[in-house]
Image (cartoon, rainbow, N blue to C red):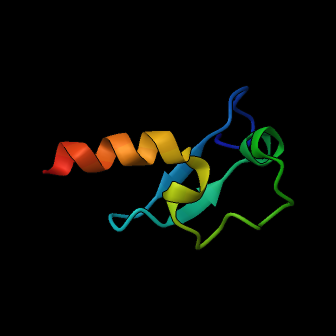
Amino acid sequence: MIESAPDGMVVANLEGIMTLVNSKLEKIFGYASGELLDQSLELLVSSDTHAWNETLKH
């Protein structure tokens, strides 16, 4: 179901580690098959967005 989705999709665990991504997401971000697995979601988030998110934690 995830693989046939028309959009990029990612599943991550509670620590923010990607456990499943579909090929559309890999194509959008320019990664080869499997390169995103076991990586942090932060890899897909721009540095501006990451900095903004950090300010929300304080």
Q: Is residue 54 left or right of residue 35?
A: left
- On screen, residue 43 versus residue 35, left or right, reads left
Q: Residue at x 72, y 43 (%)?
A: 25
Vertical arrangement, residue 34 with respect to residue 55, above or below:
below
- Quadrant housing residue 28: top right
Residue drawn 73% across and 26% down? 6
In the image as oriented, which residue stretches furthest toward the left?
A: 58
> For the point 41% across and 62% down, which residue is it?
16
Where does the image place residue 7, in percent across and percent down from the top left? 68, 29
Kindly indicate the quadrant of the structure image that contains residue 52.
top left
The residue at the point 50 percent across, 57 percent down is: 42
Whether residue 34 sits left or right of residue 21 in the image: it is right
Q: Position of residue 46 (x, y in %)?
A: 56, 44
Percent of width and height locating residue 9 = 61, 41
Q: Observer-nearest residue: 51 or 29?
A: 51
Mark count: 0
Classify residue 39 by image quadrant: bottom right
Quadrant where the N terminus sits is: top right
Q: In the image as oriented, which residue stretches furthest toward the top?
A: 6
> Position of 14 compared to 37: left or right?
left
